[in-house]
Image (tube, coloured by chain):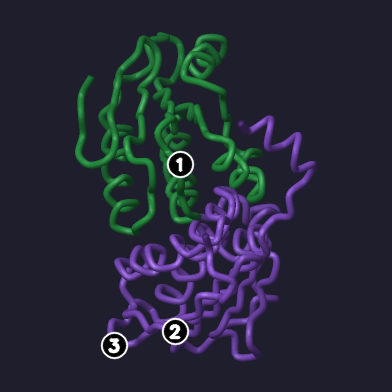
Amino acid sequence: MASRAPTTRSMAIASTPFAIVEVCEWILPKLEANNFSQEDIFAVHLALEEALINAIKHGNKMNPDKEVKIDYSVSSDKVEISMTDQGDGFDPEAVPDPRLGENLYKNEGRGLLLMQSYMDVVEFNKRGNRVRMVRYKEKPRLPETQRQAQA
Amino acid sequence: MASIKPRISVEYAENATIVTFTDEKILEEKDVQALQESIMSVIEQAPLSSVEDRKGGINLILDFCNVRFLSSTVLGLLIRISKKVYERDGQLKLCSINPKIYKIFKITRLTKIFDIYQDIESAVESLSIAD
């Protein structure tokens, strides 16, 4: 049975793509342990991947001497993740909407949209080098019938 | 069926080249880079369309039946693949995308620019109709 106390941890990772796998392997099992649904885990996994790619590739420019600091907290009702890179930051408001016009055919620029679509809260600091994301565990809808349908 | 390393299998059907992603998760940039090299090579080497009066573009079907997770890096790869296929007057169809992955396509509105089919059979059939 999951503990009521949230799992909270801070870590710093090197700016390498391999570190993304490690972070996911640390955080996602905590969601399972707290009985998050597979849909929640998929959503958090995707947002984590996108945020880490942004931090490592666009923030720290893949510089192995720069780190990404990650703080996360997983409790029975929500998961909260913050990550800070050592880059110059960016203005999320200035990111073009990848769903519009010619942007639809661009090779990049969809990460932020996916983070915003799959997490309940996505907010940046003023400098734009720190993102905080929250996803709340989905409340059961029609619990009895749904459980029966899933059984 | 030819097997190409890493991470795809390739089958040449009557009127199409079918590339199946063999991994459940497509994540790391180096994996995506390897996939890009493999698939671009398939596109360049694919037999031309069997229909005489067509310009000879290739018919490529990307089968996602094994894929359970991908990130936006893969979406970028698909855009690059589509550009390559269309440059060569070919057709590109995607198929067997699981609902969670399909939702990513919906959110990013890539459903507007990719032809997505339920399964390989319907993707192949769509090519026959187009021919």
Q: Position of residue A86 (x, y in %)?
A: 44, 89
Image mark for residue A72: none
Viewer-side label of 1, 2 = 2
Residue at 65 percent across and 63 percent down: it is: A119
Question: Closer to us: mark 2 or mark 3?
Answer: 2
Crowding at label 3, few (<14), some or many (≥20) Cα neighbours within 10 Å?
A: few
Give the chain letter at badge 2: A
Report whether B85 appears left or right of B1. right
Residue labelled with disc 1: B68
| Residue A84 drawn at (x, y percent) | 49, 84
Q: Colour of chain B?
A: green
For the residue marked with disc 1, what is the amino acid? Arg
Q: Amino acid at mark 2?
A: Ser
**Residue carrying label 3:** A65
In this picture, is A110 found above or below B88? below
- Name the residue rendered at 70%, 65% in the picture: A120
Circles 2 and 3 in contact, beta carbons < 8 Å: no
Mark pair 1, 2: CA separation: 29 Å
